[in-house]
């Protein structure tokens, strides 16, 4: 005899299909069905009235939705009933059982094996599911049953868990999602196995990733990072080291701090100095680690971005194929720190971007002219001025560029990243 827990929110039309499929199940005793409603605005209660032969109880869940908390609350409601079943079947309201033996097939492993206290069934997409859902459900839920003994694999959209197991550990109440996988990992750590029953099928409209909902994706990433040991994965930073970033200096540094930075870099890494033909070089800089590149006249009046093709060809001559470069020039602002190689590495490891502009935050009033229309960062609301903060670029302090940008200069403004510098005075 089993109890069934259905979580629902604004899915009354799907609940009709689910309850109808439960009513058609054979060779299984359904004890209590708990419909736990998290603030639906449609008429869930009226749907229940269509199924007088089912023992359905309606409960309102008014707390903020956290899946583990809501599941545990529903499980406690079922345990308070007289003569609860041996296990609880958890099924999402937007699922319904494919045939009349789905429940029996789902429960069989728990009843027939003392080492299995949880099982989950196959989720089959609908013909009206979006293409991503069709792909993901088809690949994630193959038509082959198996017993899981080492890695926490589980999905509670259609699952069964014995009350014995739930008495030892319930769902994690802090995780925003993936609470089912966390639960399964704990169950395996206790020495039990989990069954995937391919012949216990439900039709599932949604895919497992909810069409890549941005908030859900963000929350999923946070959960995986917080429980790396449970997911048996380690999230690695990109393998970028300071030795993989090539320093470029455009012109002999005039500022003392920038000059000293170049001098210190030459003690342990190769640097490239790009100068005009008539520019003189301090003798102290003439070391083996300094490569001097003289610009042809046609490049001398070009901006840095217009020299990318020339610089790329020059670096190739010196067998320099590093993935990132950092450029310094005499627009250096000594009131802000230099972006050294380690700070550049830290920025790259965070998101592996194409371009990192050194910037400081400013609330100075800025006017921009776009298509002969003037825009300002100053908004007047009820005569109170609210200045939008701007990032002001200090390129000379360390502008980090991917080698890919050298090949295609138009990428320099595509999804830029920023290294924010603090005022030093």
Image (tube, grey):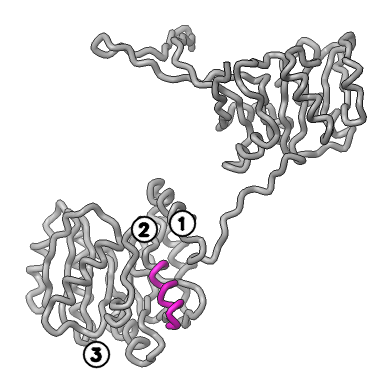
114 or 51, nearer to the observer: 114
Which residue lies at the image location 24% right of the left edge and 62% below the top edge?
A: 70
Q: Are marks 1 and 3 in contact (CB under 8 Å)?
A: no
Upstream in the sequence, badge 2 or badge 1?
Answer: 2
Specify few, some or many for label 1: CA neighbours under 10 Å numbering under 14, 14-19, or 20 or more: few
Asked which secondary structure carries label 2, the reply is: loop
Upstream in the sequence, badge 1 or badge 3?
Answer: 3
Q: Is residue 393 above or below residue 52?
A: above
Q: Is residue 374 above or below residue 343?
A: above
Does the segment drawn in magenta span residue 255? no
- Dot 1 corresponds to which residue? 226
Q: Is residue 124 visible?
A: no
Q: Are marks 2 and 1 in contact (CB under 8 Å)?
A: yes
Does the segment drawn in magenta span residue 187? yes
Q: Is residue 190 above or below residue 300?
A: below
Asked which secondary structure carries label 1, the reply is: helix
| Range shown magenta | 182-192
Where does the image place residue 384, in percent across and percent down from the top left? 28, 12
- Dot 2 corresponds to which residue? 175
Where does the image place residue 69, in percent across and percent down from the top left? 27, 62
Q: Quadrant of residue 82?
A: bottom left
Upstream in the sequence, badge 2 or badge 3?
Answer: 3
Which numbered mark, 2 or 3, is in the foreground of this view?
A: 2
Give me the C-alpha separation between circle 2 and circle 3: 36 Å
61 or 40, nearer to the observer: 61
């Amino acid at each position: 005899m089993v109890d069934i827990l259905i979580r629902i929110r604004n899915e009354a039309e799907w609940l009709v299909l689910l309850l109808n499929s439960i009513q058609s199940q054979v060779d299984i005793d359904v004890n209590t069905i708990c419909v736990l409603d998290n603030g639906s605005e449609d008429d869930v209660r009226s749907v229940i009235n269509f199924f007088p032969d089912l023992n359905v109880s309606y409960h309102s869940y008014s707390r903020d939705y956290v899946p583990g908390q809501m599941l545990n609350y529903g499980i406690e409601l079922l345990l308070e009933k007289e003569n609860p079943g041996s296990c609880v079947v958890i099924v999402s309201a937007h699922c319904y059982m494919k045939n009349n033996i789905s429940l029996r097939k789902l429960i069989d492993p728990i009843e027939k094996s003392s080492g299995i206290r949880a099982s989950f069934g196959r989720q089959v997409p609908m013909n009206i599911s979006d293409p991503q859902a069709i792909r993901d459900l088809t690949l994630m839920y193959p038509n082959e049953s198996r017993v899981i003994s080492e890695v926490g694999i589980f999905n509670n959209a259609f699952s069964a868990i014995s009350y014995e197991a739930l008495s030892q550990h319930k769902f994690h109440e802090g995780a925003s999602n993936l609470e089912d996988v966390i639960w399964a990992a704990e169950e395996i750590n206790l020495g039990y196995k989990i069954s995937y029953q391919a012949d216990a099928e439900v039709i599932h409209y949604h895919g497992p990733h909810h069409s890549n909902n941005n908030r859900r994706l963000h929350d999923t990433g946070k959960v995986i990072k917080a429980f790396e040991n449970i997911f048996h994965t380690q999230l690695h930073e990109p393998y970028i080291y300071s030795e993989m970033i090539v320093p470029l200096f455009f012109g002999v540094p005039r500022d003392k701090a920038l000059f000293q930075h170049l001098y210190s870099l030459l003690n342990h890494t190769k640097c490239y100095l790009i100068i005009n033909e008539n520019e003189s070089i301090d003798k102290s800089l003439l070391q083996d680690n300094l490569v001097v590149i003289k610009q042809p006249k046609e490049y001398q009046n070009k901006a840095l971005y217009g020299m990318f093709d020339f610089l790329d060809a020059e670096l190739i001559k010196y067998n320099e194929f590093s993935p990132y470069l950092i450029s310094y020039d005499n627009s250096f602002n000594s009131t802000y720190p230099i972006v050294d190689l380690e700070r550049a590495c830290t920025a790259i490891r965070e998101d592996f971007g194409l371009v990192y502009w050194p910037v400081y935050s400013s609330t100075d009033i800025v006017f921009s002219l776009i298509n002969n229309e003037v825009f300002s960062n100053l908004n007047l609301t009820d005569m109170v001025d609210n200045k939008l903060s701007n990032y002001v670029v200090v390129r000379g302090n360390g502008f980090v560029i991917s080698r890919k940008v050298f090949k295609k200069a138009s990428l320099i403004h595509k999804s830029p990243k920023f290294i924010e510098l603090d005022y030093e005075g």
